[in-house]
Image: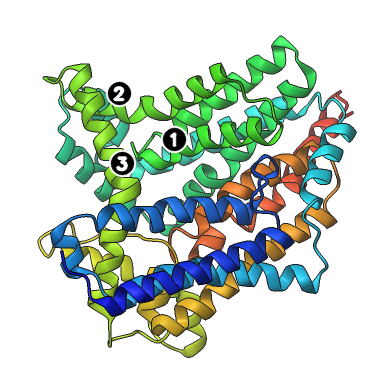
Amino acid sequence: MNIPLTEILLYICLLILLFLTYLLSDKIIGLTNIRQINIISFFFFTYMINLIGGTVIYFNNREAVLKINADYILMIFLGVIGVLLGAVFISLIFNFQKNEVGLFIHECMKNSRNPKLLNRVMIFVGLLASIILMLIYQKYVDQIPILYLLSGESDARLLKSVRASGYKTITQFITHPMNMMRSTVYPFFVALSLLIYLIRKHFLSLLHFLIILTMAVTFNSYTTALKPVAMLFVIIFLSLWILRKLSLFQSILIFLGFFSFPVLSTYISKGNSSLTQVLIFETSRLFERFILVIPDILLSYVEFYNGNHLLGSAHRPIAILLGKESVKVANQIFLYRDPGGYFLGNATVPFVGPLYADFGLIGVFLGSIIVGLTLHGLQIFLLRRYSRNILSLAVFIVFVWTGYSATSSTFTTGIISKGLVPILFMPFIINLFVSLKRFIGKGKYT
């Protein structure tokens, strides 16, 4: 496996530059204090695992090394360096102090009162919205993925086709509300109901949390997609981690919850396989999906768009401003990688891929700076402008996850559909329903 000396030197220089950027970011933002995790530190560590670590593992074989090129190496490093620099820049502008996150969390817990109506409001809103969206969804699809899976006659390949054809051919009228419910509303409800239980320590609060979690898992598993269900358990983990209430037993329960849905779905679809075989298969599949697939797909972006950049068409808002037709780059790459595959399939990657498709390496670097400015700017706004209460803390917990999730596709799309901006409105919406409940019937939000 002979790697050109110039690319080895490039790799070393980029590692040194990344290390220096990390030191600067840690001094100003606080990346190493993992107990006071924030949106930038969570993004940094997940990016390092998924892209930097994934790249090292992926290129540890002869075929992958033959495909490596300088553009790919520069792209993944410029992405994380740009985000950190953008976050540092806006921190300096607004004089952000890295202890602000810890103070925010402490004051939210200290000043929180007992919200007696919140759980009932969340259950009511969740049930009503879920039933309406599920009924509309059923109207548009021939087969419901989760029911097809539970029928006992499902096949893994056919299940994937049913999910794709069902979820991706329905109109945007229902797609966006379903995405918002899965990515924003239910994660917020789960975080908030868990915080209420941790504060009150009442059995009824625990029961409310379990009811809301069951509702969330049921709705998010409707299309049998893995990520929406796994996200709920990540939210639980982040909630307990940030509040320093995570025990070994709780960690095991969260891991089992995270791992149970893909194992059960595969076990049902592969009726002739033993549970041990399914566990081995799912462990391998999850490792490949979260670690190895992303570098492989990003390489396809570099191969396909190198010298053939779209100049704004990969990001719909930019395309509209330029008077151009937007291009679904994830679909283009999917068909490039699998010409005979499903025509609506998507090969989604972190934000650096679409940025490269549009403007090349310059676009990756400048776009990543904008991503850092946006993520940390919104975080500073949340920390300083929101009331210090349990609602704001729930927003912060989901915000940390949603910020990372928003970078898993084109960032302009992720800001809306992944819930980065909508999550900031959740306290106002919940208070509106609570006020309505107080107006209609007897109750008190204390």
Helix, strand or loop status at disc 3: helix
Residue toward you, 208 or 143: 208
Q: Is residue 368 left or right of residue 303?
A: right
Q: Residues within 10 Å of mark 3 (few under 14, many from 20)?
A: few
x and y percentages locating residue 183 in the rendered image: 52, 46
Q: Residues within 10 Å of mark 1 (few under 14, many from 20)?
A: many
What residue did someone put label 1 on?
Answer: 229
Quick check: marks 2 and 1 in contact, CB under 8 Å? no
Q: Residue at x 34, y 53 (%)?
A: 54
Q: Earlier in the sequence, mark 2 or mark 3?
A: 2
Residue toward you, 79 or 181: 79
What residue did someone put label 3 on?
Answer: 287
Asked if 97 appears above or below 278 in the picture, the reply is below
Asked if 241 appears above or below 136 in the picture, the reply is above
Q: Is residue 97 left or right of residue 150?
A: right
Q: CA distance from mark 2 to mark 1?
A: 13 Å
Give residue 125's mark: none
Amino acid at dot 2: Leu
Asked if 21 appears above or below 293 in the picture, the reply is below
Helix, strand or loop status at disc 1: helix
Give residue 264's mark: 2
Quadrant showing the C terminus: top right
x and y percentages locating residue 363 in the rendered image: 46, 81
Q: Earlier in the sequence, mark 2 or mark 1?
A: 1
Quadrant showing the N terminus: bottom left
Quick check: marks 2 and 3 in contact, CB under 8 Å? no
Amino acid at dot 1: Val
Q: Residues within 10 Å of mark 2 (few under 14, many from 20)?
A: some
Total marks in image: 3
- Res. 153 image quadrant: top left
